[in-house]
């Protein structure tokens, strides 16, 4: 059934301070509304349980991509389109650009935001695995000030996260790496555009004379949260890629992920494909 | 979960197809519904209502969006173009001419969105290659044509556009 329009409020905010004081005034009553690509789907289906939102889409304080020698900082409202067209991101964080280009279609990419993808907290989001392997940090703001926390560990359970009701994600900070890295991103969905992933995989590796010096791996749609896989990484660190390494990594990955059956895929398919994609990542190094 | 509150309608000003509009609407109303029901611009179609099919595509400040996913508050002071604003007077746009010439429309439900997406593509990339055309139309579904005629129409429109 369609939503009953007068039940919903969407309040304009002139600036960030105004939005934050509204969130702080009655914690939990107001929630942020950005590009709307997830919320409006629930709204139209009559499944948007929360009723009162503050419009943050127009806040300039949450926009823009800043670059310093050490970090690239994305305003939370950076859209998928903006991610794809940024030169520094293309060169140094190509998996983020690829994830952005494989999210929805162009109209979704023009409205969907990185901050929204994080705060929507879906385990099937396309950018979270890339953000996890790039060791992203989040800047959270409230009327009390701001804090910087690692993205890894931010999602604490299905749709649960370390974001207080009075806080907003202000920006996402990515440390720039001096090491040449191999980047591998793979989304497996039903079709090329507009599909929600069955699984998605992001991996970076630093390889020196055929030995894996360092490796970071994360997957989406295989656990209640976007999942970094430190145990699989540990199995791989310091080893050469051969059959034995691949087999050990596949086994460890199976222990580390916990895929389920749902409308998009099955646990068995997800496990098999996650292992195959991991193997492809390793053997194509 | 919060208690139900009756939200009131607000005034929103925007420009639609070069005409200034003053709307009295709920801020969460979908741009799609406002266009169709308040402004009677029924050329914009509703397909899936969840941002998957692109039938409701319009341009907001020149940016392609799914109007079913945009609450009207977010187009305050914006410039909107719908399918009704693509032709100039009696002269069809090169993309529209090309859709006719190539048989790019069958049942017609996807056509307004397809035309909007194609016009937007040619504004951004005047001479798109095959991948760029595919990417530009990737968010628009068609259940009749098998896409090839639509694809050919866009190629045709580029050739005709550059002749003008």
Image: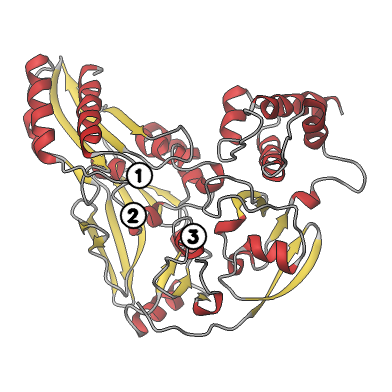
Q: Vertically, is A144 above or below A246?
A: below
Q: Position of residue A14 (x, y in %)?
A: 53, 74
Q: Real-space Cα distance between discs 2 and 1?
A: 8 Å
Tell whether label 1 touches label 3 (CB within 8 Å): no
The residue nearer to you, when weighing B28 against B48, is B48
Residue labelled with disc 3: A36
Dot 2: element: helix
Q: Residue at x 6, y 30 (%)?
A: A235
Residue labelled with disc 1: A127
Tell whether label 3 touches label 2 (CB within 8 Å): no
Earlier sequence position, callout 2 versus callout 1: 2
Q: Residue at x 39, y 42 (%)?
A: A196
Labels 2 and 1 share a subunit: yes
CA neighbours of label 3 inside 10 A, class few (<14), some (14 to 19), many (20+)? many
Dot 1: element: helix
Q: Real-space Cα distance between discs 3 and 1?
A: 17 Å
Earlier sequence position, callout 2 versus callout 3: 3
Q: Chain of mark 2?
A: A
Q: Chain of mark 1?
A: A
Residue labelled with disc 2: A118
Q: Vertically, is A161 above or below A94?
A: below
Earlier sequence position, callout 3 versus callout 1: 3
Q: Residue at x 71, y 39 (%)?
A: B107
Q: Position of residue B38 (x, y in %)?
A: 73, 69
Q: Residue furthest right?
A: B90
The residue nearer to you, when weighing A171 against B156, is B156
Q: How are the colours assigned in the image?
A: secondary structure
Tell whether label 1 touches label 2 (CB within 8 Å): yes
Q: Quick check: B131 left or right of A226?
A: right
Which marked residue is nearer to the observer: mark 3 or mark 1?
A: 3
């Amino acid at each position: 059934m369609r939503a009953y329009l007068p039940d919903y409020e969407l309040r304009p905010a002139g600036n960030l301070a105004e939005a934050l004081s509204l969130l702080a005034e009655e914690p939990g009553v107001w929630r942020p509304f950005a590009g709307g690509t997830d919320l409006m789907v629930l709204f139209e289906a009559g499944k948007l349980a929360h009723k009162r939102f503050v419009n943050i889409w127009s806040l300039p304080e949450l926009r823009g991509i800043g670059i310093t020698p050490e970090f690239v900082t994305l305003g939370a409202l950076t859209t998928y389109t903006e991610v794809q067209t940024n030169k520094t991101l293309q060169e140094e964080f190509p998996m983020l650009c690829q994830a952005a280009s494989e999210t929805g279609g162009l109209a979704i990419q023009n409205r969907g935001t990185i901050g929204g993808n994080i705060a929507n907290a879906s385990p099937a989001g396309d950018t979270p695995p890339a953000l996890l392997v790039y060791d992203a940090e989040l800047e959270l703001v409230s009327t009390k000030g701001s804090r910087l926390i690692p993205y890894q560990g931010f999602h604490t359970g299905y749709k649960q996260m370390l974001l207080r009701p009075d806080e907003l994600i202000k920006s996402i900070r990515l440390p720039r790496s001096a090491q040449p890295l191999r980047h591998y991103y793979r989304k497996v969905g039903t079709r090329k555009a507009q599909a929600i992933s069955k699984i998605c995989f992001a991996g970076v590796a630093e390889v020196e004379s055929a030995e894996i010096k360092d490796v970071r791996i994360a997957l989406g749609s295989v656990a209640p949260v976007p999942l970094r896989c430190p145990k699989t990484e540990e199995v791989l660190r310091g080893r050469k890629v051969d059959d034995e390494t691949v087999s050990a990594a596949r086994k460890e990955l199976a222990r580390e992920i916990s895929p389920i059956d749902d409308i998009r895929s099955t646990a068995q398919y997800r496990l098999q494909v996650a292992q195959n994609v991991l193997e492809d990542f390793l053997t194509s190094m | 979960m919060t208690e139900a509150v009756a939200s009131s309608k607000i005034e929103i000003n925007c420009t639609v197809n070069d005409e200034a509009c003053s709307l009295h609407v709920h801020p969460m109303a979908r741009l799609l519904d406002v266009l169709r029901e308040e402004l009677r611009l029924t050329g914009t179609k509703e397909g899936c209502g969840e941002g998957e099919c692109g039938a409701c595509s319009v341009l907001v400040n020149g940016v392609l969006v799914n109007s079913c996913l945009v609450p009207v508050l977010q187009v305050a002071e914006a410039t909107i173009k719908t399918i009704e604003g693509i032709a100039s007077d009696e002269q069809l746009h090169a993309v529209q001419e090309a859709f006719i010439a190539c048989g790019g429309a069958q049942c017609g439900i996807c056509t307004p969105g397809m035309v909007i997406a194609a016009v937007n593509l040619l504004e951004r990339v005047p001479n798109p290659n095959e991948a760029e055309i595919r990417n530009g139309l990737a968010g628009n579904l068609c259940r009749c044509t098998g896409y090839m005629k639509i694809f050919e129409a866009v190629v045709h429109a580029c050739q005709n556009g550059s002749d003008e």
